[in-house]
Amino acid sequence: MYSGIYQSSAAMTGLEKWQTATTQNISAAGVSGYKKTDTSFSAQAQGGIRTGDFAGLLRTQTVSAQNSISFTQGQLTQTDNPLSVAIDGEGFFELERPDGSIIYSRDGLFSLSENGELMDRNGYRVLPTAGTIRFNPEDGPVSIGPEGMISQGDTAVAKLSVVRIANKENLARVTGGFAEVDGTDVGRETIETPRLLQGYYEASNVNPIEEMINLIQVSRAYQTNSKIVQSFDQLQGKVTQNLAV
């Protein structure tokens, strides 16, 4: 009896984690460069119980859920902004936050600050491989080559820093992108010849229809497990009453 309660309670905890991830995905579906959170489920044996038959094995399993970030590429969409840049394939832009820390991002909707620096939408500086990216409004149009070389008029300004992250499991989601988890190594490596598209941006990799279907599945599964817990609770109450007689 208690086993059934534990199983359903564990399932409900996992479903709550799935629901949180799905809700976040839906709310961020329109955010450029956003990477969705996937939820996977696994079974764990309860209390070291050993059993040889399949039916018994099912009765002695509890479910746990794990969330992970999906780094699949989103759709590349054209814009009228020459400062927008999309990475076609692997890689991340490097951004510097006001505190000097570095984060990694796929969001290439860039703009100019008041002093002519290239910034992301959060006001973080877009980093080049060396020096600083700064433009003069009087020096002509800006062009960004497929390998990241930035020019204004006939003058080369800098080259965008695009890096490969080997250990993506060591990245944590933060405002504007991803940061290294403290004490870990993300395996950062500069990509010398990235594939960039000027005048494009990468949309999120969220499929809103799939996420809405996930929400329905979560709701139904949660209701089912909630009813199972209630049934076991009622049964336990009846057993206790009978034993007391």
Image (cartoon, rainbow, N blue to C red):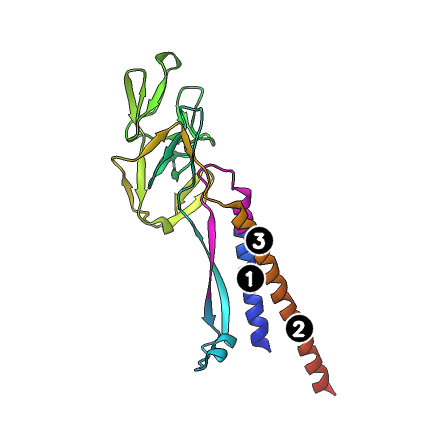
| Residue pointed to by mark 3 | 215
Residue 165 on the magenta segment: no
Badge 1 crowding class, 10 Å Cα cut-off, few under 14, some 14 to 19, many 20 or more, is: some
The mark found on residue 231 in the picture is 2
Front position among marks 3 and 2: 3
| Residue pointed to by mark 1 | 13
Q: Where residue 57 appears, x then y in whole percent? A: 47, 77
Quarter residue 178 falls in? top left
Front position among marks 1 and 3: 3
Q: Which residues are magenta?
A: 22-42
Direction from residue 97 to residue 157 in the image, left or right: left
Q: Earlier in the sequence, mark 1 or mark 2?
A: 1
Three-letter code for the amino acid on which mark 2 is drawn: Ser
Q: Secondary structure at mark 3?
A: helix
Front position among marks 1 and 2: 2
Nearer-the-camera pick, 182 or 124: 124
